[in-house]
Amino acid sequence: GNTISSKNSGSFIQTSSYASIFGGLHGHVLYNFATIINGKNNYAHGLYSFVCNGYRNYTNSISASHTATTVINGVRNSAKRNYATIVNGFYNRITSNFGFIGNGIFNFVVSEGMYNSILNGSGNTVQGGYNNNIISGYKNKILGTSISENSIINDKLHQINNGITGSTIIGGNSITATTSNTMYGDFVNFRSLTGNVTQMVVSSSDGSLLTTSLPVQSISNGINIFTGGTSV
């Protein structure tokens, strides 16, 4: 039930049933229903594992016991846990269930945890926890076993540590999140809050930000008496 489509390719299927290699050079399939399509020196190890194109990409290169890991294109990428997926990039690593890396270089979704992801960027790490995400940037980190639903969006050297939930860092440089359910950044500019004069930003009862005119206080003609410590 196994298939190798190209002869003399140096590819081989080991101890597997219904496994396939289509094209490429020196592909290695280990375990049932695993598939390699094209590429060179690719390894599909694990039940329903899939490698498509690229060079020296691995699924379950340490153990063949994990299921449905996928690597699509790229160079030296490695997905080693259940339902982990890497799409393109260079030397990206996943050792976390349901982890995802889309492009970039030297990005790591590692340790225990689930549903963590990195989209592009370089040198980013999500280590443990659940539903944490990094979108682009350089050497950003989300670290811990009790950490969930956090995000870092772009720029560099940000960090969210263990115990934080639901916080987001946007842009900036070298920001560390210390409080849950909080958004961090260096500056903010909302086009909807601009006007022709200086205004004051206030929060409505539902949490929306609105603008209002600055309060104006005037001094009446005549004698005005003020107590020390008060303002006009």
Image: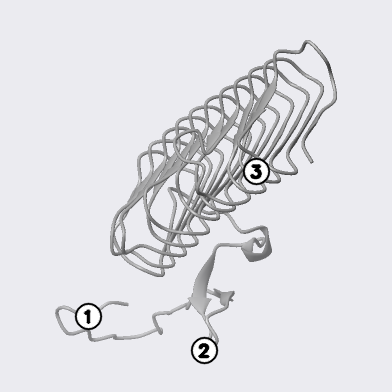
Q: Which residue is mark 2?
A: 205
Q: Earlier in the sequence, mark 1 or mark 3?
A: 3
The reply to whether discs 3 and 2 touch (Cβ–Cβ < 8 Å) is no
**Residue 23 occupies which quadrant of the picture?**
top right
Disc 1 element: loop
Q: Earlier in the sequence, mark 3 or mark 2?
A: 3
| Residue 197 in the image, given as x and y percentages of width and height | 61, 62
Q: Residue at x 29, y 86 (%)?
A: 223
- In the rendered view, tell whether residue 126 sits above or below residue 76: below
Q: CA distance from mark 1 to mark 2?
A: 29 Å
Q: Nearer the viewer, residue 53 or 88?
A: 53
The disc label shown at residue 198, or none:
none
Q: Nearer the viewer, residue 62 or 192?
A: 62
Q: Which residue is mark 1?
A: 230
Q: Earlier in the sequence, mark 1 or mark 2?
A: 2
Disc 2 element: loop
Q: CA distance from mark 3 to mark 2?
A: 51 Å
Q: Say few, some or many: other residues with alpha carbon within 10 Å of mark 1 (under 14 / 14 to 19 / 20 or more).
A: few
| Residue 136 in the image, given as x and y percentages of width and height | 56, 39
The amino acid sitting under disc 3 is Ser
Q: Residue at x 38, y 67 (%)?
A: 165
The disc label shown at residue 49, or none:
3
Q: Is residue 12 left or right of residue 80?
A: right
- Which residue extends farthest bottom? 205
The reply to whether discs 1 and 2 touch (Cβ–Cβ < 8 Å) is no
| Residue 175 in the image, given as x and y percentages of width and height | 35, 46
| Residue 72 in the image, given as x and y percentages of width and height | 70, 35
The amino acid sitting under disc 1 is Thr
Q: Nearer the viewer, mark 1 or mark 3?
A: 3
